[in-house]
Image (spheres, helix red, strand yellow):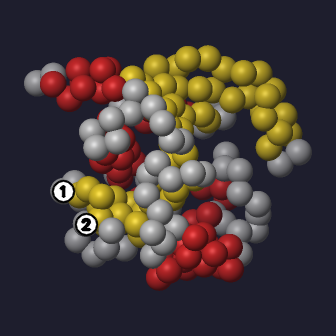
């Protein structure tokens, strides 16, 4: 299932053949630093995740992981996650190191937000991150998300109490951004 395509990125369902690449970047120290999955992240976990995502779509109960793939080669570059039904959803993004700094996350999240605010007609999309994760904070701000607040020491992450910054975007704000020349 392909949800949307941009010039360099395709937003599609995760497939079982994505599992080796998924496991590799999820184990990379710079990628996993602010993520919640257990480490090490074994290939069997990646295989189980890709299998569990078969037939899922944004809006299904629980987290739905979608692939961000190179539009030319269909090689997995990273993934986005969506959780929520009804009028709101939480999102997340993870990229392989070689895909970072190339606009992949911006393109991929733009595709996802177009889907969530378009076909799904959501009212609000939000994301949370460790405030030390400056690239994600800049990405969310660049996409028009507002920093709504930071809960101090509210998240126990690998034995450390960490802060949790929440960013959100309303459908009307997204539409206004898309209408600007």
Q: Is residue 73 above or below residue 56?
A: below
For disc 1, the neighbor class at 10 Å (few under 14, some 14 to 19, many from 20) is: few
Looking at the image, which is closer to me, 121 or 28? 121
Residue ID for mark 2: 71
Q: Is residue 9 above or below residue 116?
A: below
For this orientation, the residue located farthest to the front is 86
Q: Quadrant of residue 152?
A: top right
For disc 2, the neighbor class at 10 Å (few under 14, some 14 to 19, many from 20) is: some
Residue at (66% x, 79% y) in the render:
43
In the rendered image, residue 143, in percent from the top left (x then y), is placed at: 36, 31
Looking at the image, which is closer to me, 35 or 97? 35
Residue at (52% x, 67% y) in the render:
53
In the rendered image, residue 7, in percent from the top left (x then y), is placed at: 18, 56
Answer yes or no: is residue 105 visible: yes
Left or right position of 156 against 60: right
Left or right position of 132 against 175: right
Q: Residue 29: which disc? A: none
**Cβ atoms under marks 2 and 1 closer than 8 Å:** yes
Q: Quadrant of residue 129?
A: top right
CA distance separating discs 2 and 1: 7 Å
Q: Of marks 2 and 1, which one's residue comes earlier in the chain?
A: 1
In the rendered image, residue 19, in percent from the top left (x then y), is placed at: 54, 77
In the rendered image, residue 5, in percent from the top left (x then y), is placed at: 23, 58
Residue ID for mark 1: 7
Q: Is residue 80 above or below residue 28?
A: above
Quadrant location, the N terminus: bottom left
Looking at the image, which is closer to me, 79 or 173? 173
Disc 2 is placed on an element classified as loop
């Amino acid at each position: 299932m392909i949800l949307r395509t941009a010039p360099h990125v395709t937003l599609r369902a995760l497939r079982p053949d994505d599992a080796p690449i998924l496991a590799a970047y999820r184990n990379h120290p710079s990628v996993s630093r602010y993520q919640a999955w257990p480490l090490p992240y074994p290939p069997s976990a990646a295989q189980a995740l890709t299998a569990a995502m078969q037939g899922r779509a944004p809006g299904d109960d629980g987290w739905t992981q979608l692939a961000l793939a190179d539009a030319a080669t269909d090689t997995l570059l990273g993934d986005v996650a969506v959780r929520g039904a009804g009028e709101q959803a939480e999102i997340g993004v993870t990229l392989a190191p070689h895909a970072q700094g190339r606009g992949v996350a911006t393109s991929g999240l733009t595709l996802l937000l177009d889907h969530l605010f378009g076909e799904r007609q959501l009212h609000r999309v939000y994301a949370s991150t460790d405030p030390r994760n400056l690239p994600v904070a800049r990405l969310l701000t660049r996409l028009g998300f507002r920093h709504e607040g930071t809960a101090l020491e509210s998240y126990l992450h690998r034995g450390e109490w960490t802060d949790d910054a929440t960013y959100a975007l309303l459908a009307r704000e997204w539409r206004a951004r898309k209408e600007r020349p």
